[in-house]
Amino acid sequence: MNDQRYFSHPGIAAVLSFLFTGLGQIYNGQIKKGLIIMFFSSVAMILTILGAIVIGCWILGKFNFFILLILGIGLFLIGLSLICILGIFSIVDAFKEAQKRIA
């Protein structure tokens, strides 16, 4: 298993990272890096969902404080931004790492 050329197709690595953030890194043999990216992506998804729940509860009248709406919007936007940043990073990194392995 010393020959890493099997795990080196840049297109496949990029598509896997597009489908599931961090999967391209795992495909490239960077297990730890892929799991870390997956963990932070999961945290970002949880923030986004919590923000959406708070916003929904405020809209339905469950929360009457305007500050909770601001908190919900903040959580939602932070989570969504992190998801986008991690997704783009994962795709680009998986592609570049796979290209390095070919050379």
Image (cartoon, helix red, strand yellow):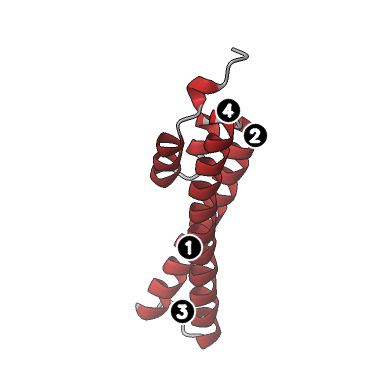
Q: Amino acid at mark 2?
A: Lys
Q: Position of residue 68 (x, y in %)?
A: 53, 79
Q: Are marks 3 and 4 in contact (CB under 8 Å)?
A: no
Identify the residue under disc 1: 48
Q: Amino acid at mark 1?
A: Thr
Sequence-first tag of 1 and 4: 4
Badge 3 density bin: few <14, some 14–19, many ≥20, Cα 10 Å: some
Q: Nearer the viewer, mark 1 or mark 3?
A: 1
Q: Position of residue 71 (x, y in %)?
A: 55, 77
Q: Nearer the viewer, mark 3 or mark 4?
A: 4
Badge 1 density bin: few <14, some 14–19, many ≥20, Cα 10 Å: many
Q: Residue at x 49, y 76 (%)?
A: 73
Identify the residue under disc 4: 29
Label 1, secondary structure: give it. helix
Identify the residue under disc 3: 63
Q: Nearer the viewer, mark 1 or mark 2?
A: 2
| Mark number, residue 32 | 2
